[in-house]
Amino acid sequence: MAKPTWKQVFRYRLDSFMARGGSSIFLSLIIMFIGLLVGITVLRGIIMIWGDVAMSQHPGFWKQVYIIFLELTDPGNMAQDIESSGVYKVVGIIAGLAGVIILSMLIAFITTALDQKLNQLKKGHSKVIEDDHTLILGWNDRVAEVLRELAIANESEDDPCVVILSEKDKEFMDDYLSVTLPDTMNTRVVTRSGAVSALVNLDIVSIQTCKSVIVLGYCTDASTKEEKAASDTRVIKTVLGVIASKAKDQEMNIVAELFEQRSRDIAHEISPGEIVTVNGLEVLAKILVQTSRSVGLSVVYNEILSFDGCEMYLHHADWNDITFGKLQFRFPDGVPMGVLTKQNKVLVNPPVDRVMQPDDQVLIVADDDSTIEFRPQPVAEVIDYNLAGGRHGQIVENELVIGWNAKAPMVLREYSDYVLEGSSIRVMLPEPDQEMRQQFKALQEELTNLRLELVELDPMKSESLITMEPFNYNNIIILSQGGENADPEPTDSETIVILLLLRKIFEAHNEKNGNSGDHDTNGKSKRTKLISEVMDSRNQELVARAGVNDFIISNRLVSMLLAQISENAEIRHVYENLFSEDGSEIYLKPASLYFDEFPAKVTFADMMGIAQKRGEVCIGVKIQADEKAIDKNFGVTLIPEKNTVYTLQPQDSLVVVSEDET
């Protein structure tokens, strides 16, 4: 091998030196400037010594050095040689030109360095110095809703902070949030860019000082099974990174969004008791079916799940062996609806005669944890009304599901747990693909207590909907029509069109039947309930005006759940109970099941008392006359002051926690 030449060695050394970055470039400019200053000074000195002009006619040597320095730093100083001979002018011109080149290089260097620093800041690689912050790992279409809920939850805190670590560019995240969530109240949002499972990046976002971690999925509800499996794999890897990075004795709530049950089982095994997993599809499917059983239930869930309004808290006090029934009337603000025992077992709607144990925590729905106060004496008097004694009898039902998405199979399975054997569900689809057909056939074989029928008609056409005779169904559920990576705007637009077509059909049917007692004044059959899924919360008001009885906002509900569990991990046990067909759930039951005479002028405390006679907990009331009033929360009021007087009509409802819908 030939020995490298001195030129090759010099070039290599120079390249290595310059590759160090800004410091080496700045040092090179300094050396170049000093070299030019020395070289031009020497040239001027030679002219002074050997020139044809006597030295006595020019300033001394050090004065000449200073003139060269001025000419290098500012070409305007060449005027100092205006009276000098031509040779000195040439040297001055050389110094001025050299100064322009050096100055341009310096400006270019400073500009480049600042630009690189700004780009580095935009990439979000600097360490976050925060304590007691909430950390969001990942990015999907729920992030803005999760942030909105966290901002509401942090409203009473001093200088709260939410940190987001995602593989998206920091500039993209900041721009997106500034448009979709311009007001974060007093919550600061800090974004950082990088691999969410890398330990070095988790250290950058100060994971060892955060209070909770939310790990978002990497795809949407409408993604393919393969994409969901890939998302779960990445989420589990991120959870492993979180567990490896957290401090030894650090307590934090870790909430992960996972789609498959197998993935959730793996996540729970990583660190038992520390990780809470949420399947958004399953939650939404359960709420859709439960809402179809009780119109107005989505409004209740929207308020309870959100930090804006009333929510669920755990509270402990000296109970003095009081029973759960009497306990409900000892709080000025809020209604107890369950108990968390010493063994971490959640009892939703326990027996009224259950004696509270010293270590029990009460599960209470209240406006804020600061307003919860246990009083030794009742805060309201309760009139002992006679219970009407009626029960909702279950009947064989006919349901219609319009549309198909990833939640559809879960919706059908949920219905099979609620309805009587022999009930039927028809699914209306325009052009089902082979995968949909296979899924539907498998469900037909699985759900033997239901009669499932696939109808291939386009719900966007009025004649197709008329053929289905929609007024003959107990419930109509409209699922979002969007497929993989669907845009919420056109998807919700299709939903609104279907709702408008259905409303027109109901109005025509109402006129044909002469506004008979089977129909209300809005043109809809009283026994047919319209329940719709909405993807974008900004379309809430439009859907409400399109004739729908109830609707759920997909992303908002799941985001609320993620945010709430991140703040209080124990709440997950409550929702597991409420979203299950087993145990107690929330229902809206007509006042006619409770009171004999109408109008019934009663207080909210009276409603709580009479609900106890049915083994239920009353947490609110719904006034039917305000069902369409958005500004009145669609007629639903949760946990009003216990002495508030209402004049109830038979069609008004009590919001209760009950074991069943009868």
Image (spheres, grey):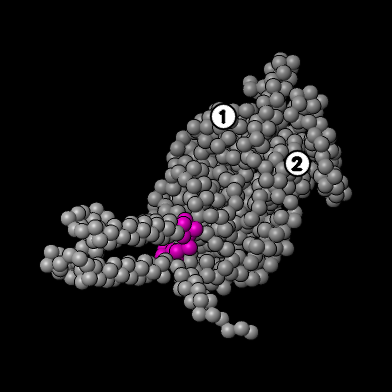
List x then y, in percent, for residue 260.
Answer: 71, 58
The quadrant in which the N terminus is found is: bottom right
- Give the labeled residue for mark 1: 628
The quadrant in which the C terminus is found is: top right
Q: Amino acid at mark 1?
A: Lys
Number of numbered markers: 2
- Give the labeled residue for mark 2: 404
The answer to which of 557 and 327 lies nearer the viewer is: 557
**Residue range highlighted in magenta:** 119-132
When asked about the image quadrant of residue 121, the answer is bottom left
In screen coordinates, is 383 left or right of 393? left
When asked about the image quadrant of residue 36, the answer is bottom left
Residues at discs 2 and 1 in contact (Cβ within 8 Å):
no
Identify the residue at image location x=20%, y=71%. 49
Disc 2 residue crowd, few under 14, some 14–19, many 20+, Cα 10 Å: many
The secondary structure type at the circle numbered 1 is loop
Disc 1 residue crowd, few under 14, some 14–19, many 20+, Cα 10 Å: some
Residue 159 in the image: above or below residue 460: below
Q: CA distance from mark 2 to mark 1?
A: 27 Å
Q: Residue furthest left?
A: 56
